[in-house]
Image (cartoon, helix red, strand yellow):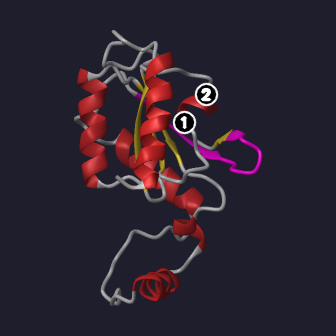
Amino acid sequence: MSSFTDSLDASNAAYVEAFSANGVPGRAGTHLLLLTCMDSRIVPHAIFGLKEGDMKVVRNAGGQMNSEVERDIVLASHILDCHNIVIMPHTKCAMASLSLPEVRIRLNERSGMDFSSFEPRMIGDWEETLRADVARLKANKLLNEGAVVRGARYDVDTGMVHWVC
């Protein structure tokens, strides 16, 4: 095994030694589902002072709504007790601060591969995108009738969550 895997195994062994979440139900204890970015500066449970089992977390580049994420959220609203849904992008997000050509150039430079036809979902105006994503989810007729959808933005420099809509 590589030293990287060995390091992960050692960290996991320490986690297992202190593990206390045995028996935690698979439903969201606080009825919360968070859609956010995959950025490593975002530690979802810590941001809201939650622990294992308190919320469901869906992550992707930019914390953006798409049809697959929307289906997952609808499912969670009915089956996993997620009646509070927060869509939360963040400051200094590459998906909102870089242009599509810049992303393609970086990918090409780092990989040596041709990314000229690669089409990631970029964010032109983060607030407009967030408001549209919240509105899209609220309008979904399959979402649990009692679900509440909110939008917020996380500040990676301060840890503050700013509620937008």
Q: Amino acid at mark 2?
A: Phe
Q: Is residue 149 magenta?
A: yes
Residue 57: x percent and y percent?
A: 42, 36
Of the pair 120 and 52, the residue shown nearer to us: 52
Q: Amino acid at mark 1?
A: Pro
At 27% from the left and 40% from the top, the residue drawn is: 72
- Mark 2 vs 1: CB contact within 8 A: yes
Residue 145, relative to residue 149: is it above or below?
A: above
- Magenta stretch, residue numbers: 148-161
Of the pair 24 and 19, the residue shown nearer to us: 19
Q: Which residue is mark 2?
A: 48
Residue 6, relative to residue 96: is it above or below?
A: above
Q: Is residue 39 left or right of residue 71?
A: right
Residue 157: x percent and y percent?
A: 75, 51
Q: Is residue 68 left or right of residue 47?
A: left
Q: Is residue 102 magenta?
A: no
